């Protein structure tokens, strides 16, 4: 179609059709600028859209498509691991509770921290930090300790 | 006798004191985590990465669950302060910088395979990270 024909065609469109034309034009421009791997990712996401089973999945897929088309504007940040600050109350409550439960269960089993470390393969320093309410343990850590103490991991679930 | 002065400065490189690895994260990954975690749960996740940063090999840790997926890694956690949330945090490691680099975070309703779209999202960010498109950490 010649440029003149395209102009006449657009002039004859209604507002809605013009907006769709603009959207498609912008989209084609952005697609054209993408590298092949990024275009392949977009096509994979289009297929995923068809199989999304929840609204959350649908939105997550859509967000990823937008991220690729926009090329993102993200930056890397560095986490400060040593600045203690004031921990959130919810974290404090959980850590105080689980530290006491784990310490009481270890003592009831007649084990020292060193012996528990040997049984679990966890560093003794890690167990110490948990029992002193300085660290929120991962499920993997709780499962190892629970198994060594002959208890189910759910024993240490407070909620 | 002159007093000894302890003068410290933050060079911005290398792990924090007491850790073997630094932890870097994409701003979008932090926003993702904050969208479904409360402040206490978010602090727990920071603790998980403190654990990881203390391990000799954060891809094969003893204190948290990590699995390899293609050319990145998935940290999994659930229960405790997380309640019903099944957490997944995706990362890579940059041995040159001694850095763990967090690329994405999602919550899952149930245990199961990593969704195709999640892998696509992580792989896309990993490619950009490897090209240096996110710059140096600030």
Image (cartoon, coloured by chain):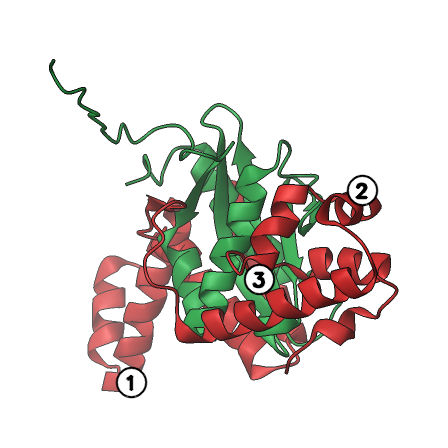
Chain colours: A red, B green
Of the two numbered discs 2 and 1 in the rendering, the one whose residue sits closer to the viewer: 2
Q: Position of residue A93 (x, y in %)?
A: 50, 75
Residue at the spot of label 1: A16
Answer whether labels 2 and 3 touch (C-beta < 8 Å).
no
Dot 1: element: helix
Residue at 47% from the left image edge and 55% from the top image edge: B46
Chain letter behind tag 3: A
Answer whether labels 2 and 1 touch (C-beta < 8 Å).
no
Chain letter behind tag 2: A
Residue A14 seen in render: no
Q: Does label 2 or label 3 sit earlier along the sequence?
A: 3
Q: Are marks 2 and 3 on the same chain?
A: yes
Dot 3: element: helix
Residue at 62% from the left image edge and 38% from the top image edge: B58
Mark 2 closeness class: few <14, some 14–19, many ≥20 residues within 10 Å: few
Q: State the separation of the CA atoms marked 3 and 1.
A: 27 Å
Numbered tag placed on residue A45 in the rendering: 3
Numbered tag placed on residue B126 in the rendering: none
Q: Is residue B72 left or right of residue A36?
A: right
Q: Are marks 2 and 1 on the same chain?
A: yes
């Amino acid at each position: 179609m010649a440029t003149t024909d395209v102009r006449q065609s657009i002039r004859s469109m209604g507002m809605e059709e013009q907006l769709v034309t603009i959207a498609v034009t912008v989209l084609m421009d952005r697609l054209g600028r993408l590298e092949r791997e990024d275009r392949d990712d977009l096509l994979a996401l289009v297929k995923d859209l068809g199989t999304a089973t929840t609204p959350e999945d649908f939105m997550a897929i859509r967000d990823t498509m937008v991220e690729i088309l926009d090329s993102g504007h993200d930056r890397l940040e560095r986490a400060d691991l040593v600045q203690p600050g004031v921990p959130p109350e919810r974290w404090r409550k959980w850590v105080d509770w689980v530290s006491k439960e784990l310490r009481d269960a270890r003592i009831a089993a007649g084990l020292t921290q060193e012996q528990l470390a040997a049984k679990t393969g966890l560093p003794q320093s890690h167990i110490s930090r948990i029992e002193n309410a300085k660290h929120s343990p991962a499920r993997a850590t709780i499962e190892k300790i629970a198994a060594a103490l002959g208890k189910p991991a759910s024993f240490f679930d407070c909620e | 006798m002159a007093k000894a002065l302890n003068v410290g400065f933050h060079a911005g490189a290398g792990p924090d004191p007491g850790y073997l690895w630094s932890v870097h994260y994409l701003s979008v990954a932090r926003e993702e985590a904050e969208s479904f975690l409360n402040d206490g749960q978010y602090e727990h996740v920071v603790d998980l990465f403190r654990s990881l940063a203390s391990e000799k090999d954060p891809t094969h840790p003893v204190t948290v669950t990590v699995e390899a997926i293609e050319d990145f890694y998935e940290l999994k956690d659930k229960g405790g302060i997380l309640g019903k949330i099944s957490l997944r945090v995706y990362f890579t490691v940059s041995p040159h910088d001694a850095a763990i680099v967090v690329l994405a975070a999602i919550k899952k309703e149930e245990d199961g395979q990593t969704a195709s779209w999640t892998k696509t999202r992580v792989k896309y960010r990993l490619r950009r990270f490897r090209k240096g498109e996110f710059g140096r950490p600030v």
